[in-house]
Amino acid sequence: MRKGMAQVFAVIVSLVLTGCLGATRMPLHESTETLDDAGGPLLLMTATIRNDYRPSFQPKLLLVHVEKTTAKPRDNSREGKINFAVDDLAPLAAGTPGSGGHYLLRMRLPPGPYRVCGMTSRIKAFPFIGTFFAPLQIAHSIEGSGVFYLGHVEAIVRERQGDEFRAGQVTPYIDQLTTGAAGGTFDITISDRFETDEKAFRERFRQLAGVEIKRTILAPFDRAAVQKWFESPYTRKSCVLPAAALK
């Protein structure tokens, strides 16, 4: 049964990644785009994704998943769950091989309570394609208007021990095993790098010139809570897309 679920959700992930289930474009994609509050506050966040377990396979960040805290487990509507697609303006200059990827992420959401579910990344290294999911499961309330900085998320893949949550699905087995997604787990840290990140955002996005950026840092990563989520039955999961079948 679980294997069948994994295959189903592998298809769902592919649909999201190819746009068939409608990923949401990150704001400030166009240079002519303005800071219009009509769609809600602008949220800024940076992320680092690195594979220390299999350093030859460094995934690229593709999606940031957010859902309303009121969304039902199987509610995959665009109103309940939002999948922000990482664009070509997000990556920062690549460092040395094995240093992973660093990203400037932007999201626009109406005020309200949300859950930052996690981040999907992928490595394509012929003949292997590995898909990773860094689960965050962090509740955060968006209030007021303007531009807000959520902090920096560092997600590092290491070898999985015992029953720790996986860094990716088990299937397709050879690809996921070779790239480290199936045999790895994520060590995740939330930090405040406002001074460094503010400068990087203002240098890349001219729309932020002279605009106040307010801090509202995400809560610390709770590994025990994510482990409990990982072990919970599928029908009771929040943030089930795309990580419902990572066991």
Image: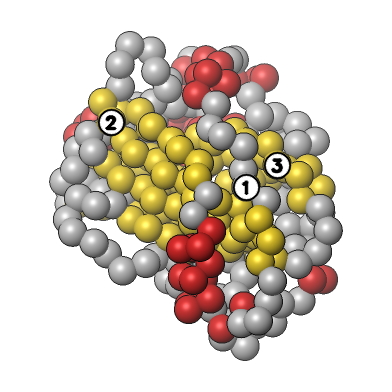
In the figure, residue 132 lies in which quadrant?
Answer: top left
The numbered disc on residue 140 is 3
Q: Amino acid at mark 3?
A: His
Q: Nearer the viewer, mark 2 or mark 1?
A: 1
Taking the spot 18% from the left edge, 59% from the top edge, the residue there is 96
Q: Secondary structure at mark 1?
A: loop
* Horizontal relation, residue 60 to residue 146: left or right: left
Q: Amino acid at mark 2?
A: Arg
11 vs 247, nearest the viewer: 247
**Cα distance in 3D space between marks 2 and 3:** 27 Å
**Cα distance in 3D space between marks 2 and 1:** 25 Å
* Horizontal relation, residue 95 to residue 135: left or right: left
Taking the spot 53% from the left edge, 67% from the top edge, the residue there is 198
Residue neighbourhood size for the residue with mark 2, other residues' Cα within 10 Å, grouped as few (<14), some (14–19), many (≥20): many
Residue neighbourhood size for the residue with mark 1, other residues' Cα within 10 Å, grouped as few (<14), some (14–19), many (≥20): some
The numbered disc on residue 158 is 2
